[in-house]
Image: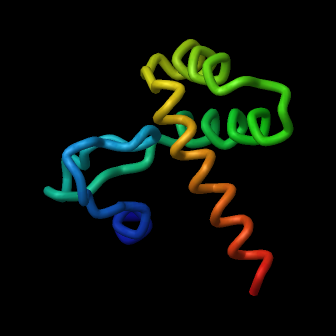
Amino acid sequence: MGMEKDLELKRRTTSTIPFGYRESEAVEGFLEPIETEIKALRETKEHIMNGSLSLRGAAVQLEYSTGRRISAQGLKKIVDKERTKGLLDRRE
């Protein structure tokens, strides 16, 4: 089980901790995923991309469901990165 936990860790590269992660208590300089936040973010991104939620509304919903604040602009960066990634994947 310890090995699986190590594989989930993500190296911390900035001073800001991304939504869906927390500082690892076990390994300094790494982030641990928070499954509930990542799942909520994934579902919210789908709603934004299909047009059923605005960025501002989605940010409020995420804060309500996870208890962690995210700005509409921060959420936009995440969604834009996902859209760009999706476009690049289609080209290959």
Q: Is residue 2 left or right of residue 42?
A: left
Which corner quadrant of the image does residue 3 belong to? bottom left
Going 58% across and 15% down the picture, which residue do you hit?
60
Residue 3 or residue 31, whichever sits in front: 31
Going 77% across and 24% down the picture, which residue do you hit?
53
Colouring chosen for the image of the structure = rainbow
Residue 23 or residue 53, whichever sits in front: 53
Going 69% across and 74% down the picture, which residue do you hit?
88
Query: Looking at the image, is 1 positioned above or below residue 73?
Result: below
Q: Is residue 13 left or right of residue 21?
A: left
Query: Looking at the image, is 21 positioned above or below residue 13?
Result: above
Rendered location of residue 70, percent (x, y)? 46, 26
- How many marks can you see? 0
Q: Residue furthest left?
A: 28
Q: Quadrant of the N terminus?
A: bottom left
Rendered location of residue 36, percent (x, y)? 56, 35
Going 44% across and 38% down the picture, which residue do you hit?
19
Q: Is residue 27 left or right of residue 22?
A: left
Residue 15 or residue 40, whichever sits in front: 15
Q: Is residue 10 left or right of residue 65?
A: left
Q: Residue furthest bottom?
A: 92
Which corner quadrant of the image does residue 18 belong to? top left
Rendered location of residue 67, percent (x, y)? 47, 17
Query: Looking at the image, is 51 positioned above or below residue 69?
Result: below
Query: Looking at the image, is 5 positioned above or below residue 3?
Result: above
Rendered location of residue 91, percent (x, y)? 77, 81
